[in-house]
Amino acid sequence: MNTPEPATTPALRVQDLTVRFGSTEAVRGVSFDLAAGSRTGLVGESGSGKSVTALSVMRLVQGATTTGQVRLGDVDVLALNRRRLQKIRGSRVAMIYQDPMSSLNPVHTIGAQITEAITLHSTVSRRDARDRAVELLSEVGVARAQERLDAYPHQFSGGMRQRVMIAMALAGDPKVLIADEPTTALDVTIQARIIDLLDRIVAERHTAVLLITHDLGVAAGFCDRIHVMQHGLIVESAEAEELYARPQHPYTRSLLGAVVDLQTDVTRPIPTTADIAPVRTSPIEVDERPTAAEPTEPDTGRPPAGATVPGIPQPGAPELLRVTGIRKTFELGHSEVRAVDDVSFAVRRGQTFGLVGESGSGKSTVSSCILGLTPIDAGRVEFDGTTVNGLGRTELRELRRRMQIVFQDPFAALNRRHTVRRLVAAPLAAHGIGDRRERADRAVEMLELVGLGTQYHDRLPRELSGGQCQRVAIARALVLEPEFLVLDEAVSALDVSLQAQVLNLLRELQQRLDLTYLFVSHDLGVVRYMCSEIAVMQSGAIVEQAGRDELFAEPKQEYTRALLAAVPTADPVTEKARRARSTAAVSA
Amino acid sequence: MAEVSAAVTAAAAPIRRRRRDVVVVIALVVLAVIVIGSLFAPWLAPHDPTQLSRDRFAGPSAGHLLGTDELGRDLLSRIMYAGRITLSIAGGAALIAMILGAVWGMAAAFARGLVDEILMRLADTAMAVPQMLLALVFVAAFGSDPVRLAVIVGVLLTPVTARMVRSAVLTEKQADYYRAAIAYGASRPRLVLTEVLPNVWAPIGVQAAINVANAIALEAGLSFIGLGIQDPDISWGLLVKWGYEKISRSLGYVTFPALAILITIWMLNLLADQLGRTDSGTQR
């Protein structure tokens, strides 16, 4: 009853919310309101406390002390007993998660799961519940809803599963819908449709949606109002247009500066602030926070990139890698999957060649085939004139000194029992180069090159952040002084500020060490920033290949156009206009 | 979601870790008391285990903490001496199972294909026959002095260990760090010894604790039916057998050796359980 304007009670009011795990505060005094029918964004990097905030609204955080106030309309959520709490979950507030596969129960049909959600909140007959389920499924855009009711989650694609999740969330007709990174696991074209769907739900049902995301592009296209979180605090709140046009807080500015999208200037390093990275810092007051450098300034202590854009080969540079007609088929039980179907391309020395596509397009299999990690069924991989496929184990080992790979998940790619120094020295040891001392010295050199000081050298991977781990992986890949580096979604798991640092580092290293990159990614903005030549893959085949300027200015293929059209831009005005256009195109 | 659960686990971890540490410490202390008491029985035992007295089937008293047996021998001292043999057999058996199982399992996991198939079907076949039955056959064929018993029990525990090692290695082989090691040109021995082995020590250690517990149970079973340790050697199983035969005269005689078996196995299982969890806790 301490609402200042009793006439318009917000659908959700969070006041001075603090969530403490032991002695660490994950959320520190967060306050915000959600009006009915509003689209609100909670934006921040991993560890900023945005998801814990969202989970606290549902009281789904375990092992924490929560103080402050969470009110859903006139209900004080934090004061509810278990039974009353169960009642409001689903009916007043519902939530959808990032991974629709693990959020659906694989042994029950979609229909069973939706009807269960319906009967939990109302007393209806099974038949009525089923009818309602069909209605809900059609509402979220699942075609032939009647038939699909009896299908199991694994028979749906990722995007369709997310639709099913949304249908379940809508079953209790909630006033507030919390979407926690609902599109992060999805391909860019599907992401756009899910955001459209959320948009429609707000318009038709007048539901208040709280969108939690790390993606400033997605937030720009959907949200009216955005709260930026860092270290458990909301550091800035503003209307979306205002926030993107005139960010006030240094953190917001650095975040926006670090975004790489189709508007990014490819000739310059991405502005970053090296000191955003630490996640688990002790509480700092807003005023004491280390102020970010002006977003237009490049990394501290790094030489600015020269006049030439990295990744463009010198005129007449020789071919380093040639892939001719490679094929790879995987057997899955009784069916076969053509992961790679007649792929050919060539990479010249000093070039960054981009391989872009959605999940399942075969791009990672191609990189694995090039390195001989996956044997190919047909075709040829030539590296500097030598045919790689069909080489014996010893010859292949020798060749691997010259070509290296960096994987997507930096934690998984590092042996968790080895220290940083040992990890980086491992390739030298594998090839019997130098003695123990020399190898350690060389490892230290490499670590300095990627910007990891001596204080990190004796740590284990789990004692590093994601960005630091990826630096270790890069140092390890470079320690043998290879000429050719495969970057397989190497920055996809990183937060924007870390991604910016790693991309800058890669471009800088390329110029310094004269490297050739094969850059595999699903992110068109990043690919555009890094690569001078790009091949677009779809279902195992290259559908279009062109130089950077050509591909992004005038894509020839329908698929490329669709991909490009779906890439969000971190600017609410262009992004909302773009979304309106593509929605119109889809419904037409 | 990954981020949230990570945050939640990380934050709730201290409390859970403290409880886990307490359990581990208790289990370790109890096991240490039992192991030290058994192995150093000649120096620690209050009486000579063969020294007779008139005080037959006595209950616990200040002179005989756990009472005496049918010949008036001190039960505590006999349990301690019996523990020497029981624990040595169990420890030896676990060691044998570990070495054989690790080689077997790793060979299968690294060879894959036909070799893997043959090695694993062999393990399956061995596991399909009840262990006690196989033990009887082996004991009948080779005899049952403590050393042979240790070898027999060790061999019996090998297939389970091999299976466990194989699956642990296969999991590691899926990991990106393993693929990365291949990609930078690591040789096969290097892959096995420096990449995979450090990461499968933990599950192997857990399995070792379980193996010791199973070996104790197996030895006790064999001795109880009279096919294990023979007089004048004594083991916990043998004491339980004798105590059981005299159950009408003294309850303590059967109970205390049985308790020694029960508590040791229980503590080993607690330890294995907690060790298994600790390891998964170190991964992020």
Image (spheres, rainbow, N blue to C red):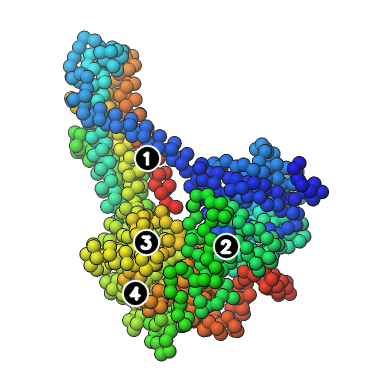
Instruction: Tell me the subunit letter for badge 1.
Output: B
User: In the rendering, at what x and y percent does residue A347 appear?
Assistant: 43, 82
Q: Which residue ends up furthest to the bottom in the rendered image?
A: A316
Q: CA distance from mark 4 to mark 3?
A: 23 Å
Mark 1 and mark 4 in contact (Cβ < 8 Å)? Answer: no
Q: Amino acid at mark 1?
A: Ala
Mark 2 and mark 4 in contact (Cβ < 8 Å)? Answer: no
Q: Earlier in the sequence, mark 4 or mark 3?
A: 3
Q: CA distance from mark 4 to mark 1?
A: 45 Å
Depth-wise, is mark 4 or mark 2 nearer the camera? Answer: 2
Q: Residues within 10 Å of mark 2 (few under 14, many from 20)?
A: some
Q: Which numbered dot is residue A250? A: 2
Q: CA distance from mark 2 to mark 1?
A: 50 Å
Element under disc 4: loop
Does label 1 lie on the same chain as label 4? Answer: no
Q: Which residue ends up furthest to the front in the rendered image?
A: A287
Q: Which residue is mark 3?
A: A453
Q: Is residue A410 visible?
A: no
Q: Amino acid at mark 2?
A: Pro
Place residue A194 in its image quadrant. bottom right
